[in-house]
Image (cartoon, rainbow, N blue to C red):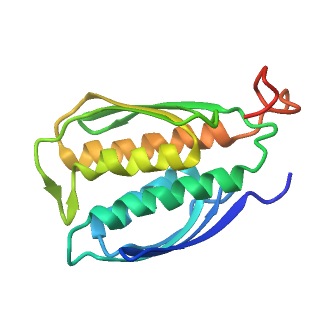
Amino acid sequence: MGERIAQIHRKTNETDISMTLDLDGQGRADIHTGIGFFDHMLNSFSRHGFFNLEVSVDGDLYVDCHHTIEDTGIVLGDAIRQALGDKKGIRRYGSSVLPMDDVLVLAAMDLSGRPYFAFDAEFSSQRVGDFDTEMVREFFYAVSYSAGMNLHIKLLSGDNNHHIIEGIFKAFARALDEATGFDPRINDVLSTKGAL
């Protein structure tokens, strides 16, 4: 098994993002996006998925948080896709039902190469810290389409917005850890087509 590490630099007129992702890490993170709550969520993603993640973002936060969060999702999706390589031997499917205090969240995915995104969660406040809650959907939409991932996220119960968002990031991390993990019974790719 070779290293499954991706290093990406993406620069636009709105954001300048550098990211390194190691799918086979220990959950170490070095995150600097300029949005404290977003840093906290990406740290949770790294820790609970056992991914090593370094992220540096210089975004147009004088406008709002939208471009910084969405573009980070695009880069994370690219990094996942690149780090997976040919996907030989991976489980492909992953899911997690995660409790966090009052919240219960479902995240399920298929690393099929065919993007699809379904999101069923509502928030009672517009912001948590400097993070717009509507950006949760935008972030994971960007990840799923950039990675070529079928991703379903559903809030099963809960009211606290901080807990809901953190539960979503943690459930996503655990589902991705499962889907990217290896199964010794899979010699090639888990598909009748012979490719993912």
- Closest to the observer: 61 or 124? 61
Where residue 30 appears, as percent x and y from the top left, is 50, 73
Q: Is residue 112 left or right of residue 191?
A: left
Q: Tell me what residue is drawn at x 56 percent, y 65 percent.
A: 53
Quadrant for the C terminus in the image: top right
- Closest to the observer: 112 or 24? 112
Q: Is residue 110 above or below residue 141?
A: above
Q: Is residue 47 left or right of residue 66?
A: right
Where residue 59 appears, as percent x and y from the top left, is 34, 76
Where residue 63 appears, as percent x and y from the top left, is 20, 73
* Outermost residue to the top: 192
Q: Is residue 24 above or below residue 151?
A: below
Q: Tell me what residue is drawn at x 51 percent, y 50 percent.
A: 48
Q: Tell me what residue is drawn at x 17 percent, y 41 percent.
A: 123
* Outermost residue to the front: 13
Q: Is residue 107 above or below residue 144?
A: above
Where residue 117 appears, as percent x and y from the top left, is 43, 34
- Closest to the observer: 164 or 138? 138
Q: Tell me what residue is drawn at x 60 percent, y 43 percent.
A: 177
Q: Quadrant of residue 190?
A: top right
